[in-house]
Amino acid sequence: MSKNRGYTLIEAIIVIAIIAIMAGVSGVTFGIVKKAQCNAAINNFNNQLTALWIKTQAISQGKEQTSPRGGDLSTYPMCMKVERNTDTSDDIRDNSYVLYLGYEDSGGSFVRKKDQAGNEEQYLCIIPNFITVEYRETPTSTPVTDGFVIRFNKADGSVIKGSGSYKFIYGDSEYGTIILNKVTGNHYMDTATN
């Protein structure tokens, strides 16, 4: 019966090589998952723009409801608000972007859409908190990253508020941009190859 003298140097090298290979594969997988999540966020945002354009064309004029500032009933045009979540009491991860459907009154205040029971409707979608959405009205304007409103014109489909570019950034890499044309209301994705 031979005595157990421990691991040989070759056995230790093999174990270290296996651990290194597994760590490398998991790092690549993590990057692929993040890229897929970035692409999904860009697609979701683009789909919500299309849905908002269609809903704007379909509704009669807007939502009649009491103004949040008090007063008589007003007609609000439909719009979508993209807002960075800072509410720590809800179940949405902090610094995620949340897309809400609602209306904008004549003073520019956003009012969330309500369901038949009078409760505020849920969000349209969430953009994960590791992605930054950078909005620029023009290429030379100051970028906005905290929140913005997008509104289409029912008459001709043009953009009343929110035209420009929306860059989706993860870390130091730009994963894609959505361009929203002011005159036509058309929008398209320009996905980066990072």
Image (cartoon, rainbow, N blue to C red):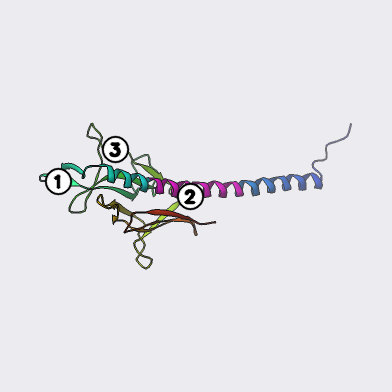
Mark found first going from the N terminus, 2 or 1: 2
Give the alpha-carbon distance from disc 2 to disc 3, as whole Å.
25 Å
Give coordinates of residue 160: x percent, y percent: 27, 56
Give coordinates of residue 120: x percent, y percent: 26, 38
Three-letter amino acid code at the position of disc 2: Cys
For mark 1, does the 10 Å Cα neighbourhood hold few (<14), some (14 to 19), or many (20 or more) residues?
A: some
Q: Which mark is residue 54?
A: none
Residue at 28% in and 51% down = 151
Magenta segment includes 171? no
Magenta: main secondary structure = helix
User: What residue is shown with label 1?
Assistant: 74
Residue at 34% in and 62% down = 137
Position of the N terminus, as image quadrant, is top right
Three-letter amino acid code at the position of disc 1: Ser
Position of the C terminus, as image quadrant, is bottom right
The secondary structure type at the circle numbered 1 is: strand
Give the alpha-carbon distance from disc 2 to disc 1, as whole Å.
38 Å
Residue at 65% in and 49% down = 24
Q: Which residues are magenta?
A: 28-47
Residue at 57% in and 48% down = 32
Magenta segment includes 45? yes
Q: Which mark is residue 121?
A: 3
